[in-house]
C-alpha cells in the first residue's frame, strides 16, 4: 500500500517542500511513497516550485482507510487530514511543540527545536547517506528561508543556517538574492480575496478547551494589508460564528522590519493583547520584534488562557 | 541549571543504561547534565553495572521546580516522575507508542520503532561523532540484550542486532555468552518479596479512561514463580483496591522458551483473556509466543478495551 506524506492544512512552503524532499529520500531508500498536500499552495511556494521546476504535490482527499501516512511539519491532530484516526501514522517529522498525538504502536517520531522542518529532512539525507538533488535542495532551501524569514526569526538556530548554506551550494543559488525574491513573491496579497487572506497559513490550536485560530500573513507592504482591515475583521467574525472559534488572531508580519500587528476577533479577543501586556486598540495590537507564531505568539497565549 | 536524565519508574536495564550512556554523550557535547533513576534497580541491571564497573545513577526526588529534564525510554506521563508538569521537558528519547505528551515549546523528541532505546542512543553517538567508551558500550549492549531477550522478541529489528554487534566489540564481550549470564542474573526471583515481584518493570497505561497496569517478570524458572501465584494474586488485588486499578496484568515471561503466562486482577480482568481470544483459568492465561508487552500485550488490550 502506498504511503502518503503531507504537511499541514493551509500549507506553507515548508509543508510542501519537506513533503517533496522526504518523499524523494524515501523512494531512494526503496519505499513506495507519494508526496501530497492538504490545501492550495501560496504564491511564495508557487514561486519556489516554478524556480526549481518541480510539480506541486497532488491534493489529497478520500484516502482509503488504513492508508499509511507520514505527517510533515505538524503533529497536532487539528492541523492534519480530516479523520486522521482512520489512517495508520507511520512517521512524524516536525519542529513544533508536541500536542495531542496518540499512536497504537511505536512509530518513527522526530521533532527538533529548529527553525524549519526541512532542516531535519536535510539531516535525514545525511544520516542515510543519500545525496540531495539540485531541485530538492532548492525546495528545502526555500523552506528554510521562508520559515526563518531569511534567518531573522528567533526560531532560527545554527543548524538552519548551516543547512541553508549547504543546500544553496547544491541548488546553485545565492542565498540572499534568491531569498529576497522568494519572500517578495510571497508578500503581494493584492490579488488574494479577503476570505483567503484571513486563512493564510492558518492553524487551529486547542488551548484549555478554547479553539484558538492563528493565521499569518507575511508581507513587505503592511500598509496595503491594513487598508483592508475592516473587510478582514468581517471575514474573521464570520468564521468565528460559523466555526465556533473562541479566539481568532491574524498576524500581519512585516518581513523587512521583523515586526507584527495582530488583528483579533472572537469572544476571547482581549487575550491577544493581554498575552503581551497590552490592550487591543480597535481590535489590533502592534508587537515590535514579534514574528514567530510558534515561539512568541502561541506560548504567550497558552500562558494567559 | 543541571539537566536530569532518567528512565521510567520501576526501571529496567534499558531505562538505567540509556540514561547513563546519554548523559555521557551529552557531557562530551559540553552540557551540564546528570543521570538519575526513578526507582530501585533490578538484579539484572545490578549484574550489568557490576560487570562494567559503573555506579548506579542517583535516585531522583525533590527536583527543583522548572528543572530541565530528559525522559529516556518512556513518554507516557504516568510512567514518569511525579509532578512532571513542574519541570521543563527538554528532550524525549524513546521506542514506545506515543501517549499523552504535551509541551509548551518545540523540543527534541525522538522515538523509533526499534527494540531498545539504547539502539537509538548508540545512533546518537554516531550522529554526533563521539566514540563510545567501553563501559557505556557494555551498558547499552546489556539494554539491547535485555529488551530483546537476546533478539528473540518480535520487537527486534536489524538496527538492534547491528548496534549490539558493534557495542559488543567496543565492550570486549561475546554477545551470547554475556547475554545468557545477564538474562539469568535477572531471572532469579527467589530473594524478591511478593510485593516487589508484582511491581517488576511495572507500567501504568490510560486506555479509554481505564487504569491498566502491566508488570513483567522475565525468568528462566517459570515454575518457581508460579508456585507463588496465590500470594502474587493477593498483592495484585491489594494494589487494585488501594490504587484504583481497573486491570492489573502480571506477565511471567519464560526467557528460554519465549512464552508468557499472564496473571490478571481487577474488575476488568476478563479482558486479559479476551484480548487473545481466550478465557482466564483461575485468573491466568497461557500465551505461547507472546513475550513483548509493547508489541503484543498493549495493542491487544487497547483493541478490546
Image (cartoon, coloured by chain):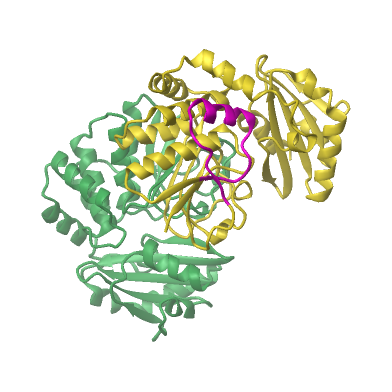
Chain colours: A yellow, B green
Q: Quadrant of the C terminus of chain A?
A: top right
Q: Is residue B163 left or right of residue B196?
A: left
Quadrant (top left, top right, bottom left, bottom right) of the N terminus of chain A: bottom left
The residue located at (22%, 40%) in the rendering is: B137
Foreground of the two, B200 or A110: A110
- Name the residue: 43% across, 42% down: A23
Which residue is painted at 84% across and 48% down in the image? Answer: A241
Quadrant of the rendered structure where residue B236 is?
Answer: bottom left
Query: How far across and down, in percent of the image, does residue B53 sit?
Result: 20, 41
Quadrant location of residue A74? top right
Residue A155, horizontal then vertical, whole percent: 55, 26
Q: Is residue A253 magenta?
A: no
Boundaries of the magenta span: A36-60
Given residues A60 and B28, the one toward you in this image is A60
Q: Is residue A208 left or right of residue B250?
A: right
Residue in front for this viewpoint, B182 or A110? A110
Residue B140 vertical placement versus B218 (above, below) = above
Q: Where does the image place residue A175, in percent across and percent down from the top left?
A: 49, 16
Picture residue at 74% right of the left edge, 33% below the top: A197
Question: Is residue B8 shown to the viewer in this render?
Answer: yes
- The answer to whether residue B1 shows anywhere in this view is no
Amino acid at each position: 500500500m502506498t504511503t502518503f506524506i503531507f504537511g499541514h492544512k493551509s500549507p506553507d512552503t515548508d509543508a510542501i517542500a519537506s513533503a517533496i524532499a522526504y518523499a524523494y529520500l524515501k523512494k531512494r531508500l526503496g519505499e513506495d511513497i507519494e508526496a501530497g498536500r492538504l490545501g492550495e499552495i501560496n504564491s511564495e511556494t508557487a514561486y519556489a516550485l516554478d524556480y526549481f521546476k518541480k510539480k506541486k504535490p497532488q491534493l489529497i482527499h478520500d484516502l482509503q482507510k488504513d492508508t499509511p501516512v507520514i505527517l510533515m511539519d505538524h503533529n497536532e491532530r487539528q492541523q492534519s487530514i480530516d479523520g486522521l484516526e482512520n489512517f495508520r501514522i507511520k512517521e512524524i517529522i516536525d519542529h513544533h511543540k508536541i500536542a495531542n498525538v496518540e499512536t497504537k504502536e511505536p512509530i518513527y517520531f522526530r521533532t527538533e527545536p529548529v527553525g524549519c522542518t526541512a532542516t531535519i529532512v536535510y539531516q535525514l539525507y545525511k544520516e542515510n547517506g543519500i545525496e540531495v538533488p539540485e531541485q530538492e535542495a532548492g525546495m528545502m532551501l526555500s523552506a528554510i528561508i521562508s520559515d526563518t524569514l531569511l534567518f531573522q526569526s528567533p526560531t532560527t538556530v545554527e543548524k538552519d543556517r548551516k543547512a541553508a548554506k549547504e543546500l544553496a551550494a547544491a541548488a546553485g543559488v545565492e542565498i540572499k538574492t534568491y531569498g529576497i525574491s522568494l519572500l517578495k513573491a510571497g508578500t503581494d496579497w493584492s490579488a488574494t480575496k479577503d476570505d483567503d487572506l484571513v486563512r493564510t497559513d492558518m492553524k487551529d490550536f486547542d488551548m484549555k478547551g478554547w479553539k484558538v485560530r492563528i493565521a499569518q500573513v507575511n508581507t513587505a507592504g503592511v500598509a496595503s494589508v491594513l487598508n483592508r482591515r475592516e473587510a478582514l475583521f468581517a471575514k474573521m467574525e464570520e468564521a468565528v460564528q460559523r466555526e465556533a472559534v473562541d479566539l481568532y488572531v491574524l498576524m500581519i508580519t512585516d518581513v523587512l522590519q521583523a515586526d507584527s500587528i495582530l488583528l483579533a476577533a472572537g469572544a476571547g479577543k482581549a487575550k491577544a493583547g493581554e498575552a503581551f501586556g497590552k490592550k487591543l486598540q480597535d481590535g489590533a495590537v502592534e508587537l515590535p520584534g514579534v514574528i514567530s507564531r510558534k515561539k512568541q505568539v502561541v506560548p504567550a497565549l497558552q500562558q494567559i488562557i
